[in-house]
Amino acid sequence: MKHIGTLEHFLIALISITLLNTFLGENFQSTAIVSTLVALTVMYKGFVVIDHFMELKGTHKYLRLMMKAYFVIFPSLIILTVFY
Amino acid sequence: MSTKQADEPLGIFFASWSEKRAGRVPGNIPIWVGILSELTEFGIFFTAYFIAKFYYPDVFSSGPQSLNTTIGVFNTIVLLSSSYFMAKAMANIRLNNLVKCERFLWLAFICGCTYLCLKTWEFHWNDLQGYSTSTNEFFTVYYYMTFNHFLHVGWAACAILWVIFRLRKGAYSAEENSGLEALAVYWHMIDLMWILIFPLLYVLR
């Protein structure tokens, strides 16, 4: 049997989160909890791609910081929309 | 210009930003200038989305229900898979496994083309439902964001073909693969933008 590596685990996690977010969006109105959950999972997905697919972990620390800041700022705005 | 002069830093950035102190720049500096430009461009789109949602909450609440979510989900899975294939291509070039590297690049290219086909079908489906850029504010933002992303996937897919051509010519190896890595980080950036676009347009009501 072929060994499933780290990248494969992350891919499965990313697809699972996408399906979970879609389920939440389809079945629930965008309440504070749903919006916050979606924002946090989007943040996590971004971090996984930045660190493990883009492989910024262990490279230029300011480029990594900038990419991660992007995935903190915009998902945070999703949480902010709860208060509209 | 002598080699010594060409290698000297320009002295316009802080010394702490140098590769020596902050760490290696994946790919090359020009691709990161491009990535920063793209991030700014998409950042403006996202800001426009949140401002429009603030002023037209009802339109943005009903908008996602008008879209074909199934195609949106498939496109997300296709782009995540393409990022995975690109990461595998990079892992294989570092092992000097050129055959496997090329195979994963083709898989990433096929994912890119699949995304383009699905997106074209989605635009056609929207058209059949009677939706266009002028339907309402949600659809204006939707087309503005997704068509721009569509173009990025299109030209990055062409860049994959170019990299495959260069790989076959022997331009990349375990020791020298900065061109391939530059394409990989650009491709991942496009995937990252879709990771943000998908919940904004298809999930959140």
Image (tube, rainbow, N blue to C red):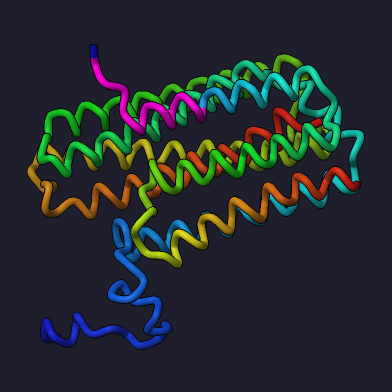
Q: Is B43 rendered above or below residue B116?
A: below
Q: Is residue B79 above or below residue A71?
A: above
Residue B179 vertical placement versus B101 (above, below): below
Tally the numbered discs. 0
Give B142 or A54, whichever is nearer the viewer.
A54
Screen quadrant of the N terminus of chain A: top left
Q: Which residues are magenta?
A: A2-14
Horizontal side of residue B126 vs B187, given as left or right: right
Among the 4 quarters of the image, the one containing residue B17: bottom left
Direction from residue B125 to residue A25 in the image, left or right: right
Residue drawn at 28 percent across, 34 percent down: B88
- Return the x and y of residue A49 as percentages of the image width and height: 46, 42
Residue A15, horizontal then vertical, whole percent: 52, 25
Front-lying residue, A43 or B112 = A43
How far across and how far down the image is residue B141, in percent?
73, 41
Q: Is residue B41 left or right of residue B171?
A: right
Quadrant of the rendered structure where residue B24 is? bottom left
Q: Main secondary structure of the magenta part?
A: helix
Task: Tell me what residue is drawn at x 59 percent, y 18 percent.
Answer: B71
Q: Residue at x 43, y 36 (%)?
A: B154
Where residue B3 appears, x then y in whole percent?
11, 82
Is B30 magenta? The answer is no
